[in-house]
Amino acid sequence: MFLALKEIKYEKLRYGLIIAMIVLVSYLIFILSSLSLGLSKENTAAIESWDMKSIVLNKDADLSLRQSLITKEQAHDLNLGNKQALLGQAGIVVKGRNHEKVASQFLGIESDSFLAHDLTLTSGHKPTNKHEIVMDTAFQDQYHYKLGQSVKLNSLTTPYKIVGFTKNAKINIAPAIYGKLSAWSDLKNTNSQFVASAIVSQTKDFNPHVDNLKSYATKKFVDKLPGYAAQNATFEMMIGFLMVISLIVIAVFLYIITIQKLPNYAVLRVQGIPASFLVKATIAQSSILVLSGLIIGALLTTITAFIIPKAVPMAFNLPLLTAVGGGLLVISILGSLIPVKTILKVDPVSVIGG
Amino acid sequence: MPAIELKNVNKYYGSGSARVHVLKDVNFSAELGEVVLILGPSGAGKSTFLTIAGGLLTATNGQVAINDINVSQLSKKEQNNLRLNEIGFILQSYNLVPFLTVNEQFKLVDKVKKSGNLSSAAMHQLAEKLDIVNLQHKYPSELSGGQKQRVALQRALYTDPTIVLADEPTAALDSQRVTEVGQLLKDLAKSQNKAVIVVTHDLRLTDHADKIYDLNDGQLTLRS
């Protein structure tokens, strides 16, 4: 540690540049991870808020909520408990006076279901009739809708009144609007034969035992959300590649620095300083550089979290960022082990003589 | 018992037709309290002699003993410890660690050799003798060639070794400093009972030597 700190103090510019490089790499990885998590959450935030364990869909809907419809007869045969709830989903466009149009997802729920009961509002109250709606806070923050304002949904002429706002009501990257299940059939433009799109269950083992309905685990359902798996795989690959590239870049830098120090190490070896001491100093130095870079990168990420526009789908999760940072630290220390063999082989004889 | 003794030491580099016989049946000994000079021109084998005597390089054949310990029978770690505890190297100038101040060059040794090093008072006294008291917080890049050489001397003596091996210790010094360094090495040998072996081609040091060897073309001969 002594040698490591002294050298960093002496060669401020050189080591400052290396720390700057690590800061940029870690910042990029942190931001990408946060973006990945943010987008992932925007796909599933509403689903997570339901604490759903399984979902029952029409067998022919190919695991798609928007394609699924449950008929009155099927619903009649279902034996729903308080852990199951009917859910109606419809793709809608929200239009408010002097506001831009927003593509959204309407989620129709029953007032006495757990979905309505668990709905946490940031302001206002839950819908009491079919023309009242609760919107995701994105409508408030990004599109400046207000409580009490009326909006039109799709081409329907009936206005819907905003009576509340709720956080994390997003599904498939669209802000959701909660309303009565009775409003759903109007918006979905279905006939009275259909009562909902799906049954959401908070138990894993709920089985409808009804023809043409099938129960799916939440993970299977989420993975089939349009674009969700591909998007996650893309981010995971980007972050993975970035980690590997970081490992190579950091390892190359540390190797070059170590090679430049070999004449000094040879002098120390002549004096009887053990090679293990020099190896420890090199690893300590790498750890200091990477930790400093990670801390500054994390600080920059924190500042970014405060100033980034709300429209950017980023989510900052401390355990995730800690794991990413830890991973980067581990691969960097592994990278710093590459020149160890060179240090062990340093020839003290090289500094004897003119 | 000699502090350092080389018996019938030969050293070859390379093999086949490229084989070079660098040291030829070298016999050498230095007692505690002696300053021994190895004089020779460039390419005579002085550096090879020094590295073998210091346990840094293994002789092709022959025996090297330091304080009666056969160096070739020691493991790398034991040779390392022997260098750290028993031998002080004075290398040619510019061999100080560039990112450590003069004072830190010694603190570094403290990290691996916790006891038996010179006390602060003894170090101060030595620095005074070498006229480098005011340089203790300077980096090597801020020192002149002569100052670096004197710091290297102080560093070599810090571990209080029994044997001092010096490689051209006066190469960067003017005549007055050469006399001072020569006298210091002599004082060191006499007052602290150390064996001081100096490899050089600087004839200005001969006045301070107890024994002089000539090394020419790998052959070492003691001047009568």
Image (spheres, helix red, strand yellow):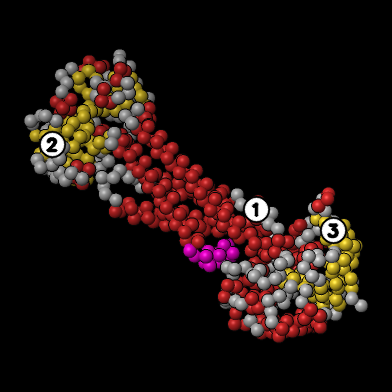
- Image position of A80 with respect to A23: above or below: above
Image quadrant in which you'd find residue B211: bottom right
Residue at horizontal 42 percent and vertical 38 percent from the top: A236
- Image position of B134 with respect to A107: above or below: below
Which residue is outermost to the left?
A157
Q: CA distance from mark 1 to mark 2?
A: 68 Å
Residue at horizontal 14 percent and vertical 25 percent from the top: A186
Q: Looking at the picture, do discs 1 and 3 lie on one chain?
A: no
Residue at horizontal 34 percent and vertical 38 percent from the top: A40
Horizontally, residue A85 falls left or right of residue A329, namely left
Q: Secondary structure at mark 1?
A: helix
Kind of residue indicated by mark 2 = Lys
Q: CA distance from mark 3 to mark 2?
A: 96 Å
Check the residue under mark 2 and report the chain it is in.
A
Which residue is outermost to the right?
B224
Residue holding disc 3: B21
Give me the disc on residue A95.
2
Check the residue under mark 1 and report the chain it is in.
A
- Main SS type for the magenta part? helix
Local packing at callout 2 (Cα closer than 10 Å; few below 14, some 14-19, many 20+) is some
Give me the disc on residue A282.
none
Kind of residue indicated by mark 1 = Thr
Magenta stretch, residue numbers:
A1-13
Local packing at callout 3 (Cα closer than 10 Å; few below 14, some 14-19, many 20+) is some
Residue holding disc 1: A342
First along the sequence among labels 1 and 2: 2
